[in-house]
Image (cartoon, grey):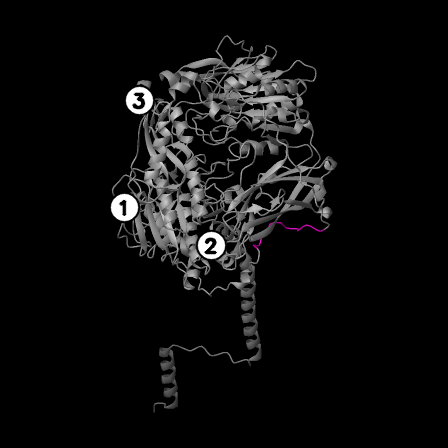
């Protein structure tokens, strides 16, 4: 619970516990010695009180690479002294991890085939910062499309997800998970649960003295993986290792995970399921330990998150390259609404995110083991994760040579065999839907090799390659960056030999594009990155068409079993590239999005743009036009604008190429050189649009909270936007935003608008156009819980700079109307009108002649905000650095320079269709035979009163919709059936014609009529005399 409290209570709630990470594994005695020797040299050693927190768990008897230390009133100098020790790698705060189980069981535990019927501002609760949450939802959270809404009479009895994915095919071959160690990190498991027969070990890593599951989530997850009866799991004979890392109050600590991970490595776990996640990819001890786990051949499967349908909401550790990240679909093969979408945001602002999730599978209404007995249904990516973990466990048991099974080879098999879902882009489905049988075929003919994810780049293929396919490329545009993951199945470590080679196809105009490649110097563990930047050559400035080529990459890894010292395994992979080129569009059509001054998720307190979102006040998603501004981007493309992304300072682009620079919700500071260049650019014709947000130091102090994760008070490091920095940027034109905080609904140019926690314009040139509206003073409501309406709040300003050929500037005080995270009523129409003004100097009459137009404010009505004293923005800023307690700008960094690869043209024809599952080397699916399995037919029964009308059809096939395999076989069966029916009628017709005609039979009379006729005949033959 995050509660606003008085500062006088600060000392009562501050607990200084730190995780001290060492450079290796040491005994408890050695760890204590290193810490004590480091702290003895601290400047405040005389007043320093510290002790090592005892950790009583199964890992305490073994060497460890970290220690939990309680330091009372720790100073920054004492922390730095610890980090200076040669055997200490890092010191980070101990974090408390709240895990709120978000599911609502729709049914009590039962046998599987039975059926049952005024706002207040004092209290704030954070649901996302630094916390890893359960990724499960209620089974009622069913995201159907309505395709089956008219079919309400019958319902198929639910099949188990293992049978839907055809695990029974592998069971009939004798594969049931035997010999594979699978770990479940969750809420525990009861000792005598009837569904499990091979629970090897149950361990408790919490501060509660129990091994049992008090919530049911851990039991459900374990059941999906390894239940042997009722709701069957995938691998009933696998060796289950239960790690209880959450209390019954749904709480955990980072140190509990670190100890449990170390123990999993010690026990040589093969597969580990983690149905939790959080946004904190900068939680270094946790991330480092996940890398260490996978480096020890532990295949980690993790849920991608339940923060969909918003893009850019991936959870850690599922967003890591070495982890199999799992998204959710429903039984209609639709991406579940709750499933988080890509891209990853580690690489922002300079780079571009990677493709995640890796794979999707069923996560809605999946049945698993109840807490004590029977079955239950749950939904969420927390459910989809154990489906894949169970499949991975089963697949691992089918491989005779277990040395071939590692995190990379397993991921290669899963993504190469996945079935792509039609009409869904790669940031929603990854490589597609899990196909267990095809994965088995690939894995059992696998040879160690490298592969790529995605395996090709086709900027013309929509919708799968969205957003790349949404905009063609042209000469002079910002390079298109595609972040490809290299998977190395040959070994935990590897390298790229020499340099990647760019080979354009001359017949397909490959020489019209330039390619630059950067890559990981070392591939570890099992993976690395390959960043491909694509640009158009100067000779194609006026050309339109398709250009193709490929990048060749050779990966080498040390040969583990090679008798020759220094032996290596090598693998060469090809990355096909296909792009659409158009002539360079006019300047007026080109919009440049400023990404550099939007901060990605940091370990600090950055509040929401909309203060009404008190249950989730921290803004943990990095802004980007392809994530939370996706709808705005799509709208601009539909209006014919070309949108590019600036991932470098303002000094690094040619302003003469662009009509408008678009700044939205900027949190970063500005270099003095940027301010100078922007003024020069606008004088020369560049236009500027700014969507701002609130910034009020009194409100920022009010919304501080105590964070249980770091056990510290958190003060916002900025407001919804960094308004003081924006004011520095635009002050030269006599403009400024105020420290006001307003909210309300109004009508502008016949459009309904909602102003959500925005600021006002405090100062504007007298020649400009200013629109004002009546709004509620939200700042007063936050500070004093009072309501007041302020008349004539300036919200919109338009200004034509006076220089000859100068650009135009438009200011609006709220960005929530174009942000997918908060939008209630969109204002895309307003963005269109502003772009008409900035790009074409066309002032919308609906604004220039609006009855809401007022005289521009002079700055006397409302004060401008000052930077919050003592803020820590410099810790996360690319612009600021600490300087004797007064942060100063860093030196301006050099602009990014790409080293374009020297082309090696090839005179050959490019492949016509890049969409094929890139065949792993030496994999022949025909060589892996499968038994003939009798297809499963579900029983059908009447729908009980009160039951859901959803159809649970085998294989996820809904009435009126067929998956890819069924769609391919239906024409064959239809043709064969028609031929059989036709043959039958031909035979019958032939028989009828060959037989002689028979006399028509007489109609048989009733018995009593026959008797009367016989009597009459007898009477006639013997007349009476």
For residue 317, above or below residue 80: below
The quarter of the picture where the C terminus appears is: bottom left
| Marks 3, 1: nearer the viewer | 3
Q: Residue furthest left?
A: 209
Residue drawn at point x = 40 percent, y = 14 percent: 788
For residue 480, above or below residue 295: above
For the residues labelled 1 and 2, the Cα–Cα distance comes to 31 Å
Which of the 4 quarters of the picture holds residue 641?
top right
Q: In the displayed structure, does residue 132 sit left or right of residue 249? A: right
- Tag 3's secondary structure? helix
Mark 3 surroundings within 10 Å by alpha-carbon count, few (fewer than 14), some (14 through 19), many (20 or more): few
Query: What is the x, y in percent for residue 107?
Result: 32, 47
Residue drawn at point x = 46 percent, y = 56 percent: 403
The quarter of the picture where the N terminus appears is: top left
The reply to whether dot 3 and dot 1 touch (C-beta < 8 Å) is no
The stretch in magenta equals 908-920
Assess whether residue 917 is covered by the magenta stretch.
Answer: yes
For residue 549, above or below residue 967: above
Q: Main secondary structure of the magenta part?
A: loop
Residue where numbered disc 3 is placed = 11
Assess whether residue 441 is covered by the magenta stretch.
Answer: no
Residue where numbered disc 2 is placed = 405
For the residues labelled 3 and 1, the Cα–Cα distance comes to 35 Å
Of residue 745 and residue 656, the one placed in the foreground of this image is 656
Q: Earlier in the sequence, mark 1 or mark 2?
A: 1
Mark 2 surroundings within 10 Å by alpha-carbon count, few (fewer than 14), some (14 through 19), many (20 or more): many
The reply to whether dot 1 and dot 2 touch (C-beta < 8 Å) is no
Residue where numbered disc 1 is placed = 211
The reply to whether dot 2 and dot 3 touch (C-beta < 8 Å) is no
Query: What is the x, y in percent for residue 837?
Result: 63, 21
* Residue 363 in sight from this viewpoint: no
Of residue 546 and residue 589, the one placed in the foreground of this image is 546
């Amino acid at each position: 619970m995050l509660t606003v409290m008085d500062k006088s209570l600060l000392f009562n709630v501050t607990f200084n516990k730190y995780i001290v990470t060492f450079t290796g594994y040491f005994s408890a005695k050695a760890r204590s010695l290193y810490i004590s020797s480091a702290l003895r040299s601290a400047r405040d050693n005389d007043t320093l009180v510290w002790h090592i927190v005892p950790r009583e768990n199964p890992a305490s008897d073994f060497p460890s690479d970290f220690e939990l230390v309680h330091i009372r009133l720790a100073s920054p100098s004492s922390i730095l002294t610890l980090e200076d020790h040669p055997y200490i790698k890092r010191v980070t705060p101990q974090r408390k991890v709240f895990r709120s189980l978000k599911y609502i069981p729709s049914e009590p535990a039962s046998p599987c085939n039975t059926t049952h019927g005024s706002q207040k501002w004092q209290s704030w609760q954070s649901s996302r910062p630094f916390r890893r949450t359960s990724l499960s939802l209620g089974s009622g959270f069913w995201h159907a499309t309505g395709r089956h809404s008219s079919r309400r009479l019958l319902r198929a009895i639910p099949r188990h997800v293992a049978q839907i994915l055809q695990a029974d095919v592998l069971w009939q071959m004798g594969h049931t998970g035997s010999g594979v160690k699978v770990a479940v990190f969750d809420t525990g498991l009861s000792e005598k649960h009837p569904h499990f027969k091979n629970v090897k070990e149950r361990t408790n890593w919490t501060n509660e003295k129990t091994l049992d599951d008090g919530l049911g989530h851990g039991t459900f997850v374990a059941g999906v993986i390894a239940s042997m009866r009722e709701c069957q799991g995938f691998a009933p004979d696998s060796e289950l290792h239960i790690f209880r890392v959450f209390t019954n109050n749904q709480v955990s600590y980072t140190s509990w995970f670190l100890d449990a991970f170390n123990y999993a490595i010690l026990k040589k776990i093969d597969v580990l399921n983690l149905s939790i996640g959080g946004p904190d990819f900068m939680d270094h001890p946790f991330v480092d330990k996940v890398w260490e786990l996978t480096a020890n051949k532990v295949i980690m499967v993790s849920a991608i998150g339940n923060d969909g349908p918003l893009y850019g909401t991936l959870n850690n550790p599922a967003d890591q390259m070495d982890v199999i990240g799992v998204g959710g679909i429903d039984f209609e093969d639709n991406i579940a609404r709750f499933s988080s979408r890509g891209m990853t945001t580690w690489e922002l602002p300079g780079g571009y995110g990677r493709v995640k999730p890796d794979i999707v599978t069923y996560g809605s209404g999946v049945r698993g083991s109840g807490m004590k007995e029977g079955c239950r249904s749950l939904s969420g990516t927390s459910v989809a994760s154990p489906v894949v973990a169970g499949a991975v466990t089963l697949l691992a048991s089918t491989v005779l040579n277990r040395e071939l099974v590692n995190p990379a080879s397993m991921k290669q098999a899963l993504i190469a065999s996945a079935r792509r879902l039609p009409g869904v882009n790669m940031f929603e489905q990854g490589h597609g839907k899990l196909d267990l049988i095809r994965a088995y075929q690939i894995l059992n003919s696998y040879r160690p090799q490298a592969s790529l994810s995605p395996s090709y780049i086709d900027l013309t293929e929509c919708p799968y390659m969205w957003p790349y396919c949404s905009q063609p490329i042209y000469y002079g545009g910002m390079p298109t960056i595609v972040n490809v993951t290299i998977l190395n199945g040959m070994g935990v470590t590897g390298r790229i030999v020499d340099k990647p080679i760019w080979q354009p196809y001359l017949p397909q105009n490959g020489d019209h594009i330039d390619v630059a490649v950067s890559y990981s110097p070392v591939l570890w563990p099992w993976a690395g990155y390959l960043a491909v930047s694509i640009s158009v050559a100067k000779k194609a400035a006026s050309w339109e068409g398709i250009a193709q080529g490929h990048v060749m990459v050779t990966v080498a890894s040390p040969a583990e079993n090679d008798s020759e010292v220094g032996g290596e395994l090598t693998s060469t992979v090809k990355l096909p590239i296909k792009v659409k080129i158009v002539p360079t569009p006019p300047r007026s059509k080109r919009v440049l999005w400023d990404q550099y001054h939007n901060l990605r998720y940091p370990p600090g307190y950055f509040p929401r743009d909309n203060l009404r979102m008190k249950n989730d006040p921290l803004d943990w998603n990095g802004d980007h036009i392809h994530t939370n501004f996706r709808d705005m981007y799509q709208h601009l493309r539909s209006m014919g604008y070309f949108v590019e992304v600036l991932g470098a300072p303002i000094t690094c682009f040619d302003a003469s190429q662009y009509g408008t620079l678009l700044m939205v919700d900027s949190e970063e500071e500005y270099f003095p050189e940027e301010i100078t260049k922007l003024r020069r650019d606008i004088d020369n014709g560049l236009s500027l649009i700014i969507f701002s947000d609130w910034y009020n130091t009194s409100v920022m102090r009010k919304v501080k909270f105590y964070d249980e994760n770091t056990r510290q008070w958190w003060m916002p490091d900025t407001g919804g936007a960094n308004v003081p920095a924006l004011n520095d940027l635009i002050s030269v034109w006599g403009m400024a935003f105020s420290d006001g905080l307003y909210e309300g609904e109004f009508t502008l140019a016949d459009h309904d608008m909602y102003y959500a926690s925005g600021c006002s314009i405090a100062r504007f040139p007298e020649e400009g156009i200013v629109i004002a509206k009546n709004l509620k003073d939200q700042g007063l409501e936050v500070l004093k819980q009072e309501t007041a309406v302020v008349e004539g709040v300036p919200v919109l300003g338009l200004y034509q700079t006076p220089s000859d050929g100068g650009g135009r500037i438009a200011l609006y005080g709220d960005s929530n109307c174009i942000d997918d995270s908060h939008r209630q009523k969109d204002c895309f129409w307003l963005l269109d009108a502003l772009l008409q003004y900035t790009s074409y100097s066309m002032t919308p009459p609906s604004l220039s002649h609006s009855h809401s137009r007022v005289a521009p404010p002079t700055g006397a009505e409302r004060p401008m905000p000052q930077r919050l004293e003592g803020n820590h923005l410099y810790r996360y800023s690319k612009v600021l650095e600490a300087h004797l307690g007064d942060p100063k700008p860093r030196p301006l960094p050099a602009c990014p320079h790409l080293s374009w690869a020297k082309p090696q043209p090839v005179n050959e024809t490019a492949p016509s269709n890049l969409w094929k599952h890139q065949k792993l080397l030496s994999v022949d699916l025909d060589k892996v035979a499968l038994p003939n399995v009798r297809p499963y037919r579900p029983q059908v029964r009447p729908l009980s009163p009160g039951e859901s009308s959803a159809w649970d059809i085998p294989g996820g096939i809904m009435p009126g919709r067929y998956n890819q395999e069924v769609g391919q076989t239906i024409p064959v069966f239809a043709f064969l059936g028609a031929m059989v029916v036709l043959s039958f009628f031909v035979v019958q017709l032939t028989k009828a014609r060959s037989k002689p005609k028979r006399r028509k039979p007489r109609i048989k009379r009733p018995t009593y009529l026959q008797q009367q006729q016989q009597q009459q005949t007898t009477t006639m033959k013997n007349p009476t005399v």
